[in-house]
Image (cartoon, rainbow, N blue to C red):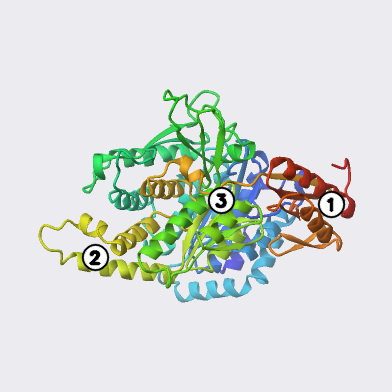
Amino acid sequence: MSFLELVNSNKVNEKYQKPEEFLNKTISYGTAGFRTKAVYLDWVMYRMGLLACLRSICQKCQYIGCMITASHNPEEDNGCKLVDPLGDMLEESWEAYASRLVNSNNLQETLKSLCENELKEWIEEYDREQEVNKLGRIQKPNIVAAYDTRPSSVALFEAFKTGVEVLDGVLINYGLLSTPQLHYMVRCLNTNNSYGEPNEDGYFNKLTTAFFNVWSMIEFNNNGKYETDLYVDGANGIGADKIKILSRLISTVSFNDKPSNGTILNMHLFNDGKQPGDKLNHLCGADFVKVQQKPPNNLPELKDEGKISKFCSLDGDADRIVYYYLDNEKKFYLLDGDKISTIIATHLRELLVGAELSDKINLCIVQTAYANGSSTNFIENVMKVKASCVPTGVKHLHHEAQKFDIGVYFEANGHGTILLSEKAESIIEERYAELMKKSEQLDEGIEFKDWIKNDKVRYSLYILKHLKDCINQTVGDALSDLLVVELILAMRQMSIADWNLLYTDLPSRQLKVTIKDRNVIKTYDAERRVSQPAELQDKLDELVKLSGSKMARSFVRPSGTEDVVRVYAEADTQELTDKLAKQVCQLVYDLAGGVGQRH
């Protein structure tokens, strides 16, 4: 039976018919996939099972992933996003196919149309290969899936599974995983394990091995400011479960070259989801801390009043992380994605210089217009590292980062990672192999660890190689990012307060203006400038010029989902910032068709 015959022979499972209330509604697959109240999702999941099979066939039956999660959304929500063969987000052109399939009121016809038109070439190639191999091993669509701790996740997985089975797909159920772990599994499966072992032990082994290879080289002393205690907010989600595993591995592992005085990283978990009344992301997690600009609920009461403690928060599916601390006056300080990318890029640049590779491997930090102006100034004028600005959205950041040998990107919300090109990987691995070959010729009595540490080039290359192995390059990964940040802080013997002082954020304000039609606003230059309405940008520039602040800037951009315009402003003081933001809101209201109350 050909694949098209298989499509035509299967009717939509009655259990997963599209509800009447959605017959005239349109929902879109975006960067986060589909996401809404869980009670409305089973029929969507069924259709995504079908789409996953189509995607696998069009990728020569490579593994396609499905992550069932709604990330930082409330526990009542859920969602689904597909993962491409190398652990990347679903190719953008396929987002339209996903939306089309889910919004169709005649699923059978839409499925058939896709196979006979847009996907015809791949479907026919698949059928030809099956005919040639019919006496041998028949290829089938290969799918892997995982889900977070939401109560609705298992039932939604069953709906997805039913969709996969309709098109004769083979499904591996990984069960409870973080989103980054699922991305890791997909990449491992499609690269013959060269990226790592495609199981949870393989994931943790890769991270902890790289971590200890770096950690064992660190000289800890009593004068260092690095805090070895880290208090981790698990957002009452899957990240809490995985932090427990990571913490146990780090605290109990026996490794040969221990750091001086046997120092270890002590992770203290709170908001683990196991206490009565705990709800996923409720008054906790990275998104809560970032948006509310305050600590989460259940912050541990620490006895040492004179000591500043280091905290971090994961989000619901453990792909975001933000750091924070309270000073002795209990003032809250947040270190968001801008601060994370800055400390990482600072250290990577120093390692490249130390390893004498800065002329061979270029480095760039990728930001959006929402990145604080102080961070951009520090990156370009102090660190002397290239900064590139792209439109809002993780897919824009990821794609831009791929253009460089090493691309560092973090959204302000704490979602991000570090990408290395094949060229960068090859250079580092080749130099490291040469280093290891030389180490085999060491004279008797010379310790490998001392030999590495006593030469700047050798040390920088060694650290660079193992630090990169601690990075999950497929997607933002809170656990991987946590280990990388802690290693860098430990190597620099830097406290969280010292880290925060690398630069001081300018005061900022974000507001929004409701307008009749968001499409009247047209932007360019990575959403930092407006081309339509014609007068808006000139008048906005004039407001910035007259703001009374040399550091002032402001931009406006239309929402992607509702008829509102988002306004961002920065200036030297909060008072000037708020004044500028209000003036820009009034300008947008007047020139772009504002409705409702004027600011």
Secondary structure beneath disc 1? helix
At 20% from the left edge and 57% from the top edge, which residue is drawn? 448
* Residue at numbered disc 2: 436
Query: Is 354 above or below relative to 509?
Result: below
Q: Percent position (x, y) of residue 129?
A: 49, 74
Image position of 338 (left or right of 198) = right
Image position of 55 (left or right of 497) = right
| Mark 3: amino acid | Asp
**Sequence-first tag of 1 and 2:** 2
Residue 588 numbered mark, or none: 1
Q: Percent position (x, y) of residue 465?
A: 35, 61
For the C terminus, the quadrant is: top right
Cα distance, mark 2 to mark 3? 35 Å
Q: Percent position (x, y) of residue 19?
A: 73, 45
Secondary structure beneath disc 2? helix
Viewer-nearest of discs 1 and 2: 1
Cα distance, mark 1 to mark 2? 61 Å
Query: Is 150 above or below relative to 380?
Result: above
The residue lying toward the viewer, choosing from 337 and 66, is 337
| Mark 1: amino acid | Val
